[in-house]
């Protein structure tokens, strides 16, 4: 049963996140208005670095799961008690007033606008394109921090357990019932992958994968392409 005292369950899928995890959990805890109303669940896919040791002293729940973001998020959701389930990547930071922003939402699900952490001017173009497209289509990516009312999430049967594009897939399921709440105040997500692999190269890769998924290419094949890149 849902614990009526817990309004938000923040579920973070983790895998070897020692670089960012301590900072991310610290900032998340600082943003919480009432610790009695929020639970933090780390759903770990088998980290073999020291990331989990770094955060053991925090007031969080650690869930062990099979590797795979959808599998990990669903495993975390099964342990969640909050009215709202919030799926947060370890390298993404919520705005300080995120609790109030979600509490004001009228529907059953939504996402935030996203801001990339890098300073390159192309990141500003990418952000605007991502947020505009998402607002028009009610399709969101995990970087935009998807959130769902708990009962609605279970009505959707959780994230489709596919190795890639699980965020797109659940958005398509959810929008059949109601459009997404699009919160304009942005979350800040790391641009490290873009900077490491090249901004234009990453743009081309992301759009190619999205097009391939739309054309029916299996997520297993897209997963291999994404991580081999």
Image (cartoon, rainbow, N blue to C red):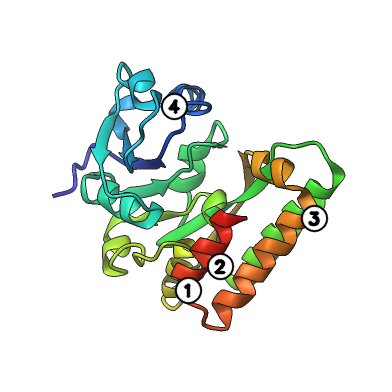
User: Residue at the top extreme?
Assistant: 57
Q: Position of residue 7 (x, y in %)?
A: 32, 41
Locate residue 36, reporting x and y percent: 28, 28
Query: How far across and down, in percent of the image, does residue 202 sit?
Result: 71, 55
Residue that protrudes farthest toward the front in the picture:
228
- How packed mark 1 is, by other alpha carbons closer than 10 Å (few <14, some 14-19, many 20 or more), is some
The residue at 42%/74% (across/down) is 173
Identify the image quadrant of the C terminus.
bottom right
Sequence-wise first label, 2 or 3:
2
What whole-number distance in Å separates the C-alpha atoms at marks 4 and 1?
Answer: 30 Å
Residue 139, label in figure: 2
Query: The residue tagged with tag 2: helix, strand or loop?
Result: loop
User: Which numbered tag is attached to residue 200?
Assistant: 3
Viewer-nearest of discs 2 and 3: 3
Q: Residue at x 30, y 28 (%)?
A: 60
Q: Does residue 72 sit above or below 211 in this rendering? A: above
Is mark 1 in CB contact (under 8 Å) with mark 2? yes
Point out the frontmost of discs 3 and 1.
Answer: 3
Q: Measure the alpha-carbon separation of dots 2 and 3.
A: 22 Å
Q: In x, y percent, where is residue 34?
A: 36, 26
Where disc 3 sits, the SS reads helix
Q: Which residue is mark 1?
A: 172
Judge by depth and name the residue closer to the eye, 59 or 52: 52
CB contact under 8 Å: marks 4 and 3:
no
Closer to the N terminus: mark 1 or mark 2?
2
- Viewer-nearest residue: 146 or 205: 205
Residue 182 appears anywhere in the view: no
Q: Check disc 4 and report the residue beneath it.
A: 25
């Amino acid at each position: 049963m849902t614990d009526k005292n817990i309004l938000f369950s923040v579920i973070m899928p983790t895998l070897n996140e020692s670089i960012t995890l301590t900072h991310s959990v610290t900032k998340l805890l600082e943003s919480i208005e009432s610790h009695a109303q929020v639970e933090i669940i780390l759903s770990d896919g088998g980290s073999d670095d020291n990331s989990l040791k770094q955060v053991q002293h925090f007031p969080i729940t650690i869930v062990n799961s099979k590797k795979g973001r959808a599998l990990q998020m669903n495993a975390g959701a099964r342990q969640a008690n909050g009215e709202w389930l919030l799926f947060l990547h370890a390298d993404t930071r919520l705005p300080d007033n995120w609790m109030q922003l979600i509490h004001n939402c009228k529907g059953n699900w939504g996402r935030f606008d996203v801001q990339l952490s890098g300073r390159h001017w192309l990141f500003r173009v990418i952000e605007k394109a991502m947020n505009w497209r998402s607002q028009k289509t009610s399709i969101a990516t995990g970087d935009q921090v998807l959130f769902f009312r708990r009962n609605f999430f279970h009505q959707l049967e959780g994230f489709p357990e596919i190795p890639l594009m699980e965020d797109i897939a659940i958005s398509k399921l959810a929008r059949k019932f109601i459009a997404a709440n699009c919160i304009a105040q942005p979350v800040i997500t790391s641009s490290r992958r873009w900077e490491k692999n090249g901004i234009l190269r990453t743009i081309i890769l992301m759009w190619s994968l999205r097009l391939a998924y739309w054309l029916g290419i299996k997520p297993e094949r897209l997963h291999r392409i994404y991580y081999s890149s």
